Amino acid sequence: MAKVLIIDDDGIVRDALTVFLTHGGHRVVSAADGGNGVLVFKSAKPDLVILDRDMPVKTGSVVFKEIRQISPDIPVIMLSGYDAPEDAEAYLRDGAAAFISKGDGLSKVLDEVDRVLGTSKPRQAAQRAPAAAAPDAPRGHSKGLLLAADDDPSILNILSRFLSSLGYEVLTAEDGARAVELARERKPDIVLLDILMPKKDGIAVLKELIAEMPGTGFVMITGNDDEEVARASLKIGAFDYIEKPVNLEQLGNILKARMLLQRQ
């Protein structure tokens, strides 16, 4: 397979793309800013670059031009945090292989990687977050039922794809009230709760559900300023917390360990 360089200052995007591309058989190297991205490009000699448009040190536009000067034939997929049709046309005219809005989700990025590298194949159903089934629907060969609640759709998309790829059935909620509703309806094995959410925050959801769902494990997702609150959530009954940007490999290990404990 190919060597792919990811240059993006968003740790969640880097981690998620690394996990999925590695699972697809690719070798992945990454950089968190434009300056290091150029250095890694020179040393790693990748077959493909996934490049964020807006970054510190050197912007994606500057990095794109420098990469083109070093190696005009290496395909570059540009990512943007917002829709920019005019910018897309300009990058494509200058030789970018694709220009993708992050709002479209990582599925499109992965599809473009397959297209550019000539490795296109039908995506496994497990890589997509399944729709919520009826309450009594059988779980089949799923490793367990998880509920992820976060008001950031991009984080939900990443978590859903990653957890589904591990074999879990995944439900998602974009606010605390919906999380409570889904949890009571489906009785998930584990609930992932962002601490700061509209309607009901993660702590309020935890307090509401912990007593009535003793068989369910709760993991809190915290921002930079939430660590004290996260520690307090352990006293309420959460079994762990994980900081943003979420380390997906670490999260996978936490969930695996918890599922083993719950099934003993």
Image (tube, rainbow, N blue to C red):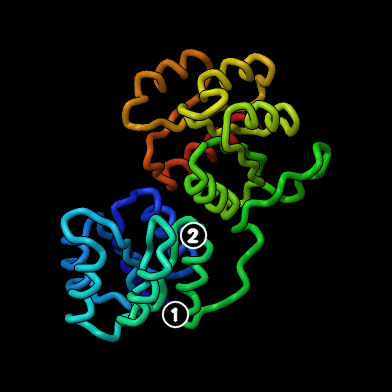
Residue at 51% x, 66% y: name it: 108
For label 1, the SS is helix
In this view, the residue farthest toward the front is: 86
The quadrant of the rendering that contains the C terminus is top right
Residue 205, by quadrant, is top right
Q: Amino acid at mark 2?
A: Leu
The residues bearing labels 1 and 2 have C-alpha atoms spaced at a distance of 15 Å
Counting from the top left corner in percent of width and height, residue 150 is at 52, 37
In-front residue for pair 115/197: 197
Q: Which residue is mark 2?
A: 106
Dot 1 or dot 2, earlier in sequence: 2
Residue 244, by quadrant, is top left
Residue at 32% x, 61% y: name it: 52
Counting from the top left corner in percent of width and height, residue 99 is at 41, 70
Q: Amino acid at mark 1?
A: Val
Counting from the top left corner in percent of width and height, residue 40 is at 20, 66
